[in-house]
Amino acid sequence: MRAGDLMKDPYFAAILMRIESHIHGTDRETRAAGGFSSKDSAVKSALRKAELAMGGKPSAKKPKGSEEEWIAALCGALVGIGREMAKEGGVPAVHFIAALKATQSSLDTRREMAGHPRGYLDFLAEFMSEAGGEG
């Protein structure tokens, strides 16, 4: 399912905004700290792992290195958001998973359009700035 299709529904738009706001914030903090340089591929890996974890299949592999640790941390945070939204907002896991898949679709589109490894992350920075978030 495409992110653009879900964004038309205010219910899903709120879920997507929560996911993408967190991704953007994590990327911004990482870059400000001057550590690991995040790329779209790391975000996509975290989204896939979060999708599996929300479906009941947590990763059995221990992260090795800064990139895998970053991916695992982002995955864990996204799963936490999904569980929090289920508990507090009644968002079923299947809806959160659909939003994760739509985020992956958006990532693929933006990365392809930009033609570089941070196409989606750079798009998010601009989008969040325009949406009133921090850029």
Image (tube, rainbow, N blue to C red):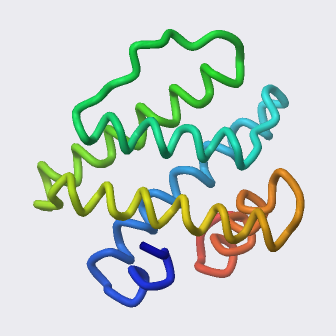
Q: Is 114 situated left or right of 59 in this image? A: right
Is residue 75 positioned above or below 82 on the image?
Answer: above
Q: Quadrant of the C terminus?
A: bottom right
Image quarter of the N terminus: bottom left
Q: Position of residue 72 (x, y in %)?
A: 52, 26
Q: Is residue 54 above or below residue 129?
A: above
Q: Is residue 94 left or right of residue 4?
A: left
Closest to the observer, 60 or 76: 60
Q: In the rendering, at what x and y percent does residue 13 appear?
A: 38, 77
Q: Residue at x 31, y 84 (%)?
A: 10
Which residue does the image show at 37% across and 44% down from the upper left?
A: 51
User: In the rendered view, would you say 38 is above or below 119?
Assistant: above
Residue shown at 85%/69% (left/top)? Answer: 114
Query: Where is residue 100 shown, x and y percent of the image?
Result: 42, 56
Depth check, front residue: 113 or 9: 113
Residue placed farthest to the bottom in the image? 8
Task: Specify the quadrant of the image occupied by residue 57.
Answer: top left
- Total residue callouts: 0
129 horizontally vs 5: left or right? right
> Which residue is rendered at x = 54% and y = 59% of the image?
104
Quadrant hosting residue 78: top left
Residue lying farthest to the right in this orientation: 116
The answer to which quarter of the image holds residue 5 is bottom left
Q: From the top left corner, tell me how far across and down residue 88 is, in percent.
A: 14, 54
